[in-house]
Amino acid sequence: MHALELVGLAEKRNSRADELSGGQQQRLAVARVLMQAPDVILADEPTASLDPGLAESITSLLIRLARDGKNTLIMAVHRIDLALQHFPRAVGLRAGGLSFDVPSGEVHSDLLEKLYSRNNNPIEEHDGEHIQYRLRCAR
């Protein structure tokens, strides 16, 4: 129950997982992690279906829990602003390989251009203006 309270799902304690919305199911997954108390938390897009405020809240919760429990947290996110705001390191992965691994404060538009460019196994297309905007929002 405590884990459900931490992720804001206490009122859904009698609901089945398949009755929950996508965002609620993601928060339920975080509650499950909290109950397991692992040494390493690998979170793959735990905030993808959440509104920005709840994404901030869940990210902060995962970071606090990892810090308090002296656990390692590795979190995959596509929101550059969230990554740069909350994490000391930013790792860019592209086409199964490492594009960059730098302190968050060293992420700049050239790194992001390379990461999101259409050259060499495109992942997503973003123009330079969009990259600059996302980087400004993250700072």
Image: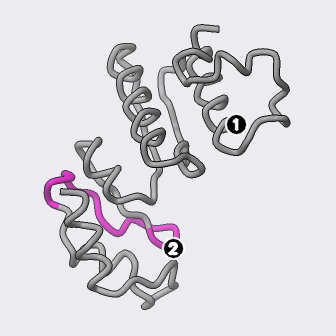
Secondary structure category for the residue under label 2: loop
Looking at the image, residue 6 lies above or below residue 83: above
Residue 116 % position (x, y): 40, 78
Q: Which residues are magenta?
A: 94-106
State the residue position of label 1. 25
Secondary structure category for the residue under label 1: helix
Nearest the eye: 129 or 36: 129
Which of the image's four quarters has the N terminus? top right
Amino acid type at circle 1 is: Gln
Q: Is residue 106 left or right of residue 39?
A: left
At 29% from the left and 41% from the top, the residue drawn is: 86
Q: Earlier in the sequence, mark 2 or mark 1?
A: 1
Task: Using the numbered discs, state the Cα–Cα distance from disc 2 to disc 1 in whole angstroms.
Answer: 28 Å
Specify the quadrant of the image occupied by residue 12. top right
Looking at the image, residue 74 lies above or below residue 13: below
Residue 95 - label: 2
Looking at the image, residue 103 lies above or below residue 134: above
Specify the quadrant of the image occupied by residue 102. bottom left
At 21% from the left and 75% from the top, the residue drawn is: 109
96 part of magenta stretch: yes
Q: Residue furthest top?
A: 1
Which of the image's four quarters has the C terminus? bottom left
Q: Main secondary structure of the magenta part?
A: strand
- Eye-nearest disc, 2 or 1: 1
| Dot 1 alpha-carbon crowd within 10 angstroms: few under 14, some 14 to 19, many 20 or more | some
Looking at the image, residue 49 lies above or below residue 68: below
